[in-house]
Image (spheres, rainbow, N blue to C red):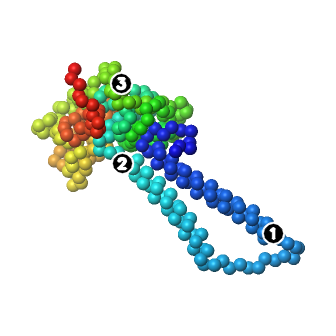
Amino acid sequence: MNLLSLPQGSNFAPSVDHLLYYLTAVSVFFILLIFAAIFYFSIRYRRQSEHDLPEPVHAGLAIEIVWSVIPFILTLVMFGWGASIFFAESRPPENAMQVYVVAKQWMWKVQHMEGQREINELHIPVGRPVKLVMTSEDVIHSFFVPAFRTKQDVVPGRYSTTWFTPTKPGKYHLFCAEYCGTKHSGMTGWVYAMEPQDYQAWLSGGRAFGSLAENGEKLFQDLACDNCHKADGSGRCPSLVGLYRRAVLLADGRSVTADEAYLRESILQPNAKIVAGYQPLMPTFQGLVTEEGVLELIEYIKSLSPGTAPAEINTNPGAPTPAPTKP
Ligand code: CUA
């Protein structure tokens, strides 16, 4: 059941709506109860004469407990229910298809693993979890698709993620939900949820850019990263082969996991975390590489660790996979 005049376009939409109905029902019930009590008591106990003095009333313990415990349980249900949806929305499944989003004043730039780029549009297949990895080039924006009941801040200097499984093909509004400057209200776009075969057709059309990892490899050479980061580990800087998602021992004794955030930081602020056994030789690439360039470099480094991220490369590993068609 959908009481809102808003399509339910994702796996989260029904559960968010049900929570909203519960909140509304509880609020309406208590508004009616309280106002009915106000009117009833104001008439029932109105002043009868000029000299009418009320008698002191001592409420019973039982009724005090009842009207404390019942609202407590009702609000705990709100908390538990809301938290469970929040946790579900915070944890993308492992097999989610990954898409990068870079926000800037005032547009949404989208990059698919296969190399497709879009501006203010996002094409995705229905029936598959989609994970968005998002960052901003300037100020805080917020990625908001009402039909998906998804809203996530997009923050400069870090990656934020959100995910959803589109359930119904259609064209849905995308909004920026964080005031980000003069043309904030114009920072809108469309999300196209497509049948898987239509999505495959869309993917194979207009493929002119090369995949993210391929572009990243080219950028890696253009920036002469390969002078120091040699694949066999003989360079002055650590080899990046097999690095992604591995634990890295740092010079100060700490250990970090080489995830996207670590790779991004190491490109833009190389001295923030020095790998044990190496000198802080690397110059910063802040200002030399765009956010898109950083994403391409990260995808290239990830491609040097085969097997760690197959779901993000494969476009349709989900259950009912169509038989591969040979060209
Ligand atoms: Cu971007 Cu508001």
The answer to whether one can see residue 199 in this image is yes
The answer to whether one can see residue 290 in this image is no
Residue at (35, 45) in percent of width and height? 92
**Label 2 sits on what residue type?**
Arg
Mark 1 lies on a secondary structure that is loop
Residue at (88, 73) in percent of width and height? 50
Does residue 315 appear left or right of residue 81 in this picture?
A: left
**Label 1 sits on what residue type?**
Arg
Q: CA distance from mark 3 to mark 2?
A: 28 Å
Rendering coords of residue 158 (x, y %): 37, 42
Q: Which residue is mark 1?
A: 46
Q: Which residue is mark 2?
A: 91
Q: CA distance from mark 1 to mark 2?
A: 57 Å
Residue at (27, 31) in percent of width and height? 322
Estimate how packed mark 3 is, as few (under 14), some (14 to 19) or many (20 or more) residues with alpha carbons within 10 Å: some
Q: Nearer the viewer, residue 236 or 296?
A: 296
Q: Are marks 3 and 2 in contact (CB under 8 Å)?
A: no
Q: Which mark is residue 202?
A: 3
Q: Is residue 213 above or below residue 64?
A: above
Question: Where, by quadrant of the figure, is residue 165 drawn?
Answer: top left
